[in-house]
Every structure is written in structure tokens, then in C-alpha cells.
Image (spheres, rainbow, N blue to C red):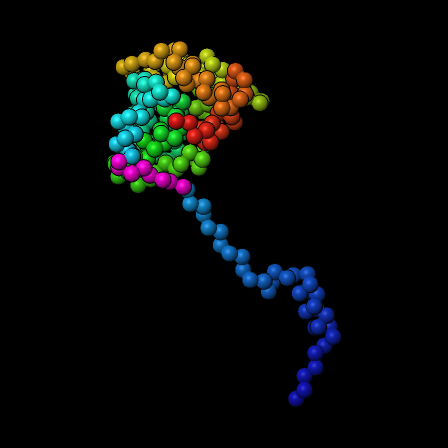
Amino acid sequence: MKFTTSPIIVALFTFTLANCPGIFAAPSPVPVAERLSVRVPTPGDCVSLFKFTRGVYHGTQDQSCVNLVENCRFTVADNNITDIWGVKSCVAAATCQGVTPLIEMVQCTQNETGSNVTVPDASQTESLDYNIYASIVGDCAWQEGGCPITQQNYIDFVYGTLSDIATSTWPDVNNVITNWWDYITQWTATGETVPYLNFNDWLHYSNSQ
């Protein structure tokens, strides 16, 4: 028996190919979740960090900064936290210790305590918790456009956070300004104040140490 192809069927098939190419296309690949970059320091690096670097920023050692670092790293490690900028003492510690060594110390501590999570490298950390930012600048954070951090906001934030962790030592305010705050404003290049986005960028990309 001889079969013939109807012109109508041919036309319909041609129309389908032209207008619905996805019907016969290969399936799209399943997206693969991006792996966070974590370079946990070696045990030797960790020993060196805690012995020579903890509390030292731009050549100046400060015990109150050590207290912030200690509170930060154990809060993160003991609670299996990966969102380091959601911890108030960590945000404050980053400004007096430097972002890079602080994250390395936290990674060392998580590894030592057997934590099942690890804080990623700075560029892949989550954004600064806006509630923490609001606690620095005040209610104007919730107004349209927000408001930037002033020098006095920053000083109050540092001393307030130290009070929260019941510190036994306090920093010299001149060191807070010239060795901590001024380095942030120099990097952000936003004048005498620092908006949220620029401070968030500093936490992610300044490689401060």
C-alpha cells in the first residue's frame, strides 16, 4: 500500500518547526549552584595570626579591639554562623582589625571548634545587615534615601558595641578616629561621611589588614 503525505500535514509540520523550535531542542542544562570561595588558613597561619596580628591594625595594638575580635569569632563559631556581617561585634571588629585578618581568624576558629560551616572570603560574604547599619546611624536610616555614617556615629557604635560585650578595656578615641575611622573614609572616598553602600563595599572589597 502506498502512503501519500497530505500538503496540510506538511504545512503544519513546517509551521511548528519555524515557530516552536524549542520542541525539538536539547533540554537546558540544570544550573549549578555557585560554590563559595573559602581558603581556610593552615594551622601554622592561624597560630601566627593569633600571636602577632590579633588586635593590631596599621602597626598599632589595641586590647579593646582584641575583645571585639574574640567576641566575634566565638559568637560565629559557637552558633554555626556564615553571615558574619549580621553580627554586630564582627562589624565593629572589622573596622579595628581589618576585614581580611578578621575573617581568617573566624575561619581558624570555626575549623578548630569543628563547626560544620565556614564563613566565606570577604568578597562572597552577605551584605551588611541593614538593622546593624540603622543602629549606627539612627532612625534616619529608614527615611527615603537613608543617611550616611558620620564620625560621631562611628565612635558611638564602637563604644556601644564594646559596652554590649562587657569589655574590660576601652580604646583611646584618637586611635578610633585616626587609625580606624580615617582608613574607612580614605578607602570609600566619600568625604567625611560613609553611606551604606560604600561601607558595605568596604567590608567586601577593601582587603583591609
- Of residues 164 and 108, the one nearer the viewer is 108
Give the residue at x 35% y 20%: 59
- Of residues 186 and 147, the one nearer the viewer is 186
Image quadrant holding the C terminus, namely top left
Which residue is at the far right? 7
Give the residue at x 64% y 62%: 21
Image quadrant holding the N terminus, namely bottom right
In the rendered view, tell whether residue 139 sits above or below residue 114.
above
- Of residues 125 and 48, the one nearer the viewer is 48
Give how far across and how far down residue 55 sits, in percent. 32, 22
Give how far across and how far down residue 120 sits, in percent. 39, 37
Highlighted magenta segment, given as a residue range: 37-44
Secondary structure mostly taken by the magenta-highlighted segment of the chain: loop
Q: Examine the image and state in which quarter residue 76 appears.
A: top left
Which residue is at the far bottom? 1
Give how far across and how far down residue 102 sits, in percent. 35, 29
Q: Is residue 2 left or right of residue 27?
A: right
Give the residue at x 26% y 27%: 51
- Of residues 97 and 163, the one nearer the viewer is 97
Give the residue at x 36% y 11%: 172
Q: Is residue 170 visible?
A: yes
Is 38 part of what is drawn in magenta?
yes
Q: Is residue 131 left or right of residue 161?
A: right
Give how far across and how far down residue 92 sits, in percent. 39, 22
In the rendered view, tell whether residue 53 sits above or below residue 171.
below
Q: Examine the image and state in which quarter residue 93 appears.
A: top left
Q: Is residue 141 visible?
A: no
Is 1 part of what is drawn in magenta?
no
